[in-house]
Amino acid sequence: MYITGIGKTKFGILRQGLPELCYEAMQKALKDANASIEDIEAIFVSNFLAGSAQSQLHINSLIASLLPGIDIPIIRIETACASSGAALHQAIISLSKYKNVMVLGAEKMSGVGMKEMTSCIAEAGDRMLDQKEGVIFPASYALIAQQHMLRYGTTVDDLALISLKAHKNANLNELAHFAYKTVTRDMINNSPIVSTPLRLFDCSPISDGAAALIISREKKDGRSIKILASALRTGTISLAQRKDITSFPAAKAAAEEAYAQAGMTPDKIDIAEVHDCFTIAELVAIEDLGFCALGESKGWIRQGKTSLTGQLPINTGGGLKANGHPIGATGASQVCEIVTQLRREAGARQVKKADIGLTHNVGGVGGTVAVHIFRRE
Amino acid sequence: MYITGIGKTKFGILRQGLPELCYEAMQKALKDANASIEDIEAIFVSNFLAGSAQSQLHINSLIASLLPGIDIPIIRIETACASSGAALHQAIISLSKYKNVMVLGAEKMSGVGMKEMTSCIAEAGDRMLDQKEGVIFPASYALIAQQHMLRYGTTVDDLALISLKAHKNANLNELAHFAYKTVTRDMINNSPIVSTPLRLFDCSPISDGAAALIISREKKDGRSIKILASALRTGTISLAQRKDITSFPAAKAAAEEAYAQAGMTPDKIDIAEVHDCFTIAELVAIEDLGFCALGESKGWIRQGKTSLTGQLPINTGGGLKANGHPIGATGASQVCEIVTQLRREAGARQVKKADIGLTHNVGGVGGTVAVHIFRRE
């Protein structure tokens, strides 16, 4: 099983609506694969909040309307911020039936008031335990950060380093939400507190964008990237239901399964895109994925191990923090970055050793986690 | 591939919330299959409007919270009113990976104001072409009915006969929304016009409910029902994008593919559950499924061919019209009825010859259509 095509729109506050974003990403992926829509046998669309924010459900049929004469199966998958990771997982399973399928992740988040958008995003949390108590996502991840600091000695400076790295990488990614934006330590340190200890620069932005992947049973050419593993796990929706909030059981289980499928240990991974919806989430991810022991991720960021020239470059495209986080598109966008790196097509942000890459896509506070592993052939 | 367990809650205006409905349906299906949740390797949850109506997305993780200690992959699928048909389709494909999976369809529709609920349902239509123009679903199906009448001579009496049959069957189905409710021709004829020519009794109700299916690679016992075909097709979202509105191209394509998979012609089907969200939709379905030629379905209902004792009993459980239409649960509920009939467990509404059954589940005005065929072994 291979990724034979990728397409990503610019991420950011964009003038386009959801259908236009979808169309652009689809066309880019088809062009990248040197394929036509007639080659695609099914489409797995992932979108999180078009119903709540734009009164538009049944997106799969909306996509069909963009493709005259095409009546293939198109379905929508939603698992909060892990929607396109879950869609990819299903797409891969469906290769038992199909030769070529598409994953299309898209989200239109701008154009909605900030208060309303905050409510929409909160729909990924439990209505009773989280929403009614005001435990929106910045608050949940702030609780995680507080616990992580208390238990492991992680500091706000560690979080700032993650933000700084994300913006440095995004600066080299023309499609990133914060492309060409120089961010300094001072800007991060002086940004407003969102939820203690998280500042504005610890939080991923509200982005529009779409990303598409073409998944094929057979290798197409030298640019095809092999899929070594696809694991999806689900856990409880609210932090209130967990004994320990500094690690996500679903992430650890998905990672373990993925490594088993790929027949490898975490140290074999060259690059990773992890779900840094908040800076603290990147540290939790590094630990959940087994790159280091619990509590030791702070050392990794302090020593620059995850920078572009480090031992294991993480979020080379800027991550959710600076590449952007159009929710339904995020998992597919992570794969676009890994594929670009494995193909040696990442230009100024190209990592030197990039043969095996991993993506880690999280819904909510670890309620859904998809982990995929890819290899250059 | 087999259906080895089914579970359905009562449909209607219920006191339970979404999680309770889900839990009940899951437990019923597990009990029916004589299985435990540990036997289930993945769950495909289908739900349409919990985000828009109850501010609750990420339902797959909400389900995980109901199942302590279980961290299997759970994903949510949404394709409007065809959500659980699409979930079943994916579940069947996933048997290439798993031995036993569950489809869980659920919807909580009551407790929301009628105007707000009408808006939520309209999210299955195009925001620009349908919603903004006021073309809500009763209006869309009224246009279809008008065209069908104009072209084929179908009458309001034909529609009334469908409603009458649905209520007659539901009267024998204790879990139906309108169980034990006697409906007469006079009640139908005197009910208020919703959208000409559709009256109240031509429209399926707002229902709460859930239905679960256990899908297995291997046959379990004599009550296991074989899955002969699973086809899903997608088409344009709005009637405004179609040349002909008296037939759904996606339904015809899905039906053709399903018959090909099953290696049979439409005349081999003994019983069918079709998507009668409005009475006219049952006539369109009978034609799209190839049970008769275009325009000839009126003869079928006039001659009683689709009644419990007819040549091809249709919607023996009461259909969407009288069994109820909790959107995300509807496709799974149709399968529950077919399985019950094929097992000879339908009691007072048991059909005499029931060896091969078909389900036809539609999203929007034919934007998504799932067709499945089952056989008693």
Image (cartoon, coloured by chain):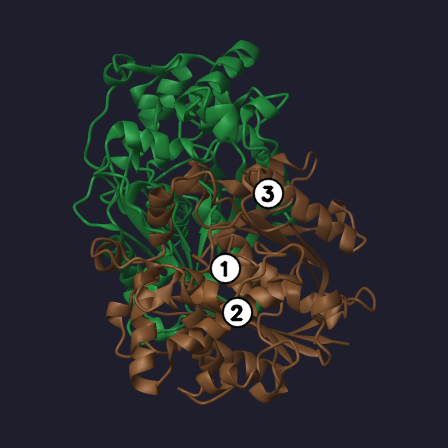
Chain colours: A green, B brown
Horizontal relation, residue A268 to residue B293: left or right: right
Residue B250 vs residue A366, the one in the foreground: B250
Q: Are marks 1 and 2 in contact (CB under 8 Å)?
A: no
- Which element is circle 2 on? helix
Kindly report the distance in space between the C-alpha atoms of the residues bearing marks 2 and 3: 46 Å
Within the image, what quadrant is residue A166 found in? top left
In the picture of the structure, the residue carrying the numbered disc 3 is A233
Kindly report the distance in space between the C-alpha atoms of the residues bearing marks 1 and 2: 43 Å
Residue A230 vs residue B9, the one in the foreground: B9
**Which amino acid, by three-letter code, is at mark 2?**
Leu
Q: Residue B278: in sight, yes or no?
A: no
* A51 to A98, vertically: above or below: above
Horizontal relation, residue B113 to residue A66: left or right: right
- Image coordinates of residue B350 in percent, x first then y, are 72, 71
Tag 1 or tag 3, which sits nearer the N-term?
Answer: 1
Q: Are marks 2 and 3 in contact (CB under 8 Å)?
A: no
Horizontal relation, residue A126 to residue B229: left or right: left
- Which element is circle 3 on? strand
* B2 to B51, vertically: above or below: below
In the picture of the structure, the residue carrying the numbered disc 1 is A91
The residue at 46%/19% (across/down) is: A133
The residue at 53%/47% (across/down) is: B208
Is disc 3 on the same chain as disc 2? no
Which chain letter matches label 1? A
In the picture of the structure, the residue carrying the numbered disc 2 is B164
Which chain letter matches label 2? B
**Which amino acid, by three-letter code, is at mark 3?**
Arg
**Which amino acid, by three-letter code, is at mark 1?**
Ala
